[in-house]
Image: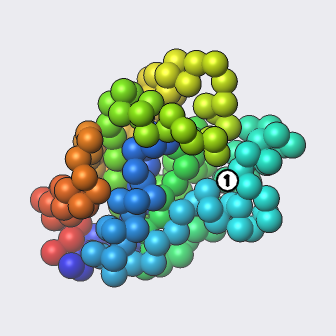
Amino acid sequence: MRIISPHPRRVFLVGPMGVGKTTIGKMLARELDLKFVDCDQEIERRSGANIAWIFDVEGESGFRHRETHVLDDLTRQDNVLIATGGGAVLNVHNRRCLKNRGIVVHLDTEVNLLVKRTAKDKKRPLLQNADPRGVLEKLKKDRDPLYKEVSDIHVFVGDSSSRKAVTQTLNKLASAGFIK
């Protein structure tokens, strides 16, 4: 498949934590013959520290600062599919980079599924509290409008398999005229 948008072969995935941006992104990148980059993993690689440590030492604001610098760099690269962190859309500069530099796909699902997928994950600092469901509900409510603002297409993955979600995404990209 070939990307035919005005953007130089850049696809960005946005959506809540636990929706499957990394898993779906890797598969989608293979289908589109793009290099896959997970923004959170790239932040860890460049900083030499894991995200939980960055949150502990620098707080969320320190992490978001790092995220903005990495995302600004990544969104300038060609032939890439980037899975962003769930909160990348919180920063207006990040939203501009995403919207203006590539095709943005919003992967979405229900809170119940996000709770189930993140239940045993100890690497997500925002969920390390007594009410992860409440946190996920609030994040979804606060961030959904921002995901919609930047996205070119919306894919509700629900509890579909990753393969089905990739097929659904490819179909939506083709229907929107982004790939052939």
| 140 or 24: nearer the viewer | 24
Give how far across and how far down residue 114 sits, in percent.
42, 34
Count residues near mark 1 (Cα–Cα under 10 Å), then give few for <14, some for 14-19, many for 20+. Answer: many
Give how far across and how far down residue 53 sits, in percent.
80, 48
- The quarter in which the N terminus is drawn is bottom left
Quick one: SS at disc 1? helix
User: Which residue is at a point 34% across and 81% down the rendered structure image?
Assistant: 33
Say which amino acid is labelled 1.
Glu
- The quarter in which the C terminus is drawn is bottom left
User: Which residue is at a point 52% across and 54% down the rendered structure image?
Assistant: 84
Say left or right for 110 vs 179.
right
User: Which residue is at a point 54% across and 38% down the rendered structure image?
Assistant: 120
Write down the quadrant of residue 111 in the picture: top left
Which residue, given by chain and number where applicable, does mark 1 sit on? 67
Q: Give the number of callouts.
A: 1
Is residue 167 something one can see in this rendering? yes
Is residue 117 depicted above or below 142 in this figure? below
Is residue 65 depicted above or below 5 in this figure? above
Residue at the far right: name it: 57
User: Which residue is at a point 45% across and 78% down the rendered structure image?
Assistant: 35
Is residue 145 something one can see in this rendering? no
Give how far across and how far down residue 32 sits, in percent.
30, 76
Give how far across and how far down residue 81 sits, in percent.
43, 68
Say left or right for 11 vs 91.
left
